[in-house]
Image (spheres, rainbow, N blue to C red):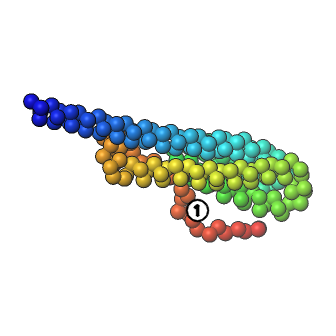
Amino acid sequence: MPLQSAQFWMVSVGLVVAAGIVLVIFNALIRMRNDIARTWSNIDVILQQRHNEVGNLVNSVRDYMNYERALLVEITEARNRLARANGVHDKAVQDKRLHDGLDRLFVTIENYPDVKANHLVRDLMRRITELEDMLADRREVYNHSVTRYNTMIASVPIVFVAGPLGFKGADLFSAENEARRRPEVSLR
């Protein structure tokens, strides 16, 4: 009997330790998944701020640039597509399109001294530039969180816990292939 009792306790202690390890891994994965959700939410907040500021900029510039209406329409449409986008990949694609349109608008504004001198337009351009910088920083934080999480769920021994518990990899916020090409800027 004493040998069976010792085996029972060793098995019991082993099961308790294994359950403890699973719980620690599970809680770490939940924290990391929540961190990804938080960093994505931070990006979404700035996307919404930019959405609002772009509308203000387009309205302010519209009066000055009647014959640049096609560019303003393109930016407005890109802004609306981004507002309707779902998921990381779709938002990244639409975000890139809006960013490209804003770049072209800023270059165009530089060619119009009256528009460029308008303090409202200047302030809005500065604000959008600040938001673009903030977005770049938040994307980096988001991608760092996703990379840490994806690495963790693919690492041994965590992969043996993460898979059965339904933890799946998250998508990075990445640019489209066309965004990796050198942009061409035309001042015509």
| Quarter the C terminus occupies | bottom right
With 119 as the anchor, is 183 left or right in this view?
A: left
Give the camera-side residue of 137 and 65.
137
- Asked if 52 appears above or below 66 in the picture, the reply is above
**Residue at x-position 11% and y-position 35%:** 3
Residue indicated by mark 1: 179
Q: Farthest front residue?
A: 2
The location of residue 55, given as percent across then percent down, is 74, 43
The location of residue 35, given as percent across then percent down, is 53, 42
Amino acid type of the residue tagged 1 in the rendering: Ala
| Quarter the N terminus occupies | top left
Where, by quadrant of the figure, is residue 103 drawn? bottom right
Asked if residue 28 shows in the view, the reply is yes
Around disc 1, counting alpha carbons within 10 Å, would you say few (fewer than 14), some (14 to 19), or many (20 or more)? few
Disc 1 secondary structure class: helix
The location of residue 116, given as percent across then percent down, is 86, 57
Give the camera-side residue of 33 and 62.
33
With 183 as the anchor, is 122 left or right in this view?
A: right
Asked if residue 71 shows in the view, the reply is no
With 187 as the anchor, is 135 left or right in this view?
A: left
The location of residue 117, given as percent across then percent down, is 90, 56
- Asked if 28 appears above or below 98 in the picture, the reply is above
With 15 as the anchor, is 136 left or right in this view?
A: right
